[in-house]
Amino acid sequence: MSFARIALFAAGLSLACNPATTIATQAVAAEPAALGAPAPAFTLTDTDGQTVSLADFKGKVVALEWFNPDCPFIVSAHKGGPLEAMPKAWTEKGVVWLTINSNAEGKQGHGKERNAKAKGEYDLPRAVLLDEDGSVGRAYGAKTTPHMYLVDPAGNLVYRGGLDNAPRGSAPKTGAVPFFENALSAVTAGEAVKTADTKAYGCSVKYGS
């Protein structure tokens, strides 16, 4: 066997023995949705058994939150953090807030029963949408929980990234910047988002193979 074939075989064996490496490669390799372009269409079933499509909300501002009820970053953000009041406050202003779980079967925070319970635990405005094959998460390039996206009334993706620059409440010396809430304020006012692409932080989205 040639050296090149041995190297390829070894690389394949390493990936096969390390599912986390394979999953990470697949998640990162997904081409993320482009800012300013139409947001990737999707139809998912929520934990109440209802079918929900992004197209249902044409003409409205839509916030997308990637979610894992057992992720410490989600717990921190929803219980005493920025997401404790933000979803309810903005849905009362007419924003549609969709919470999406792309974790695969057998992964942390997966499953209809767990996420149905999470709706009450976190006082979510809607039932959690289940993206068990990860196709929607990959279409958006979602990497963490939370990972935030914002779709304008024309259906274009106008923000992607983190809630702010303060993971689990740890703000830099320069002060916390509420990136996502700033984006919500701009879009609902009919203005352009000044900072549209920021670094997301949190637990990794646990895609399947």
Image: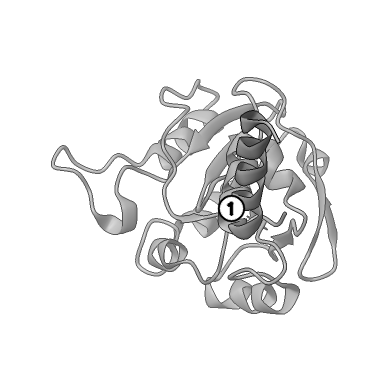
Extreme residue in the front direction: 1
Q: Is residue 32 visible?
A: no
Q: Where residue 153 sits in the image (x, y, percent)?
A: 68, 30
Give 68 or 134, whichever is nearer the viewer: 134
Q: Nearer the viewer, residue 82 or 23?
A: 23
The residue closer to the viewer here, 157 or 88, is 157
Up-down relation of residue 104 to residue 143 (above or below)? below
In the picture, which quadrant includes the N terminus?
A: top right
Q: Secondary structure at mark 1?
A: strand
Q: Is residue 139 above or below residue 46?
A: above
User: Which image quarter holds the C terminus?
Assistant: bottom right
Residue in the picture at 70% in, 57% down? 208
Tell me where residue 54 appears, x and y as whole percent: 77, 42
Q: Position of residue 35 (x, y in %)?
A: 59, 23
Label 1 sits on residue: 66
Q: Residue at x 40, y 69 (%)?
A: 79
Q: Is residue 48 left or right of residue 148?
A: right
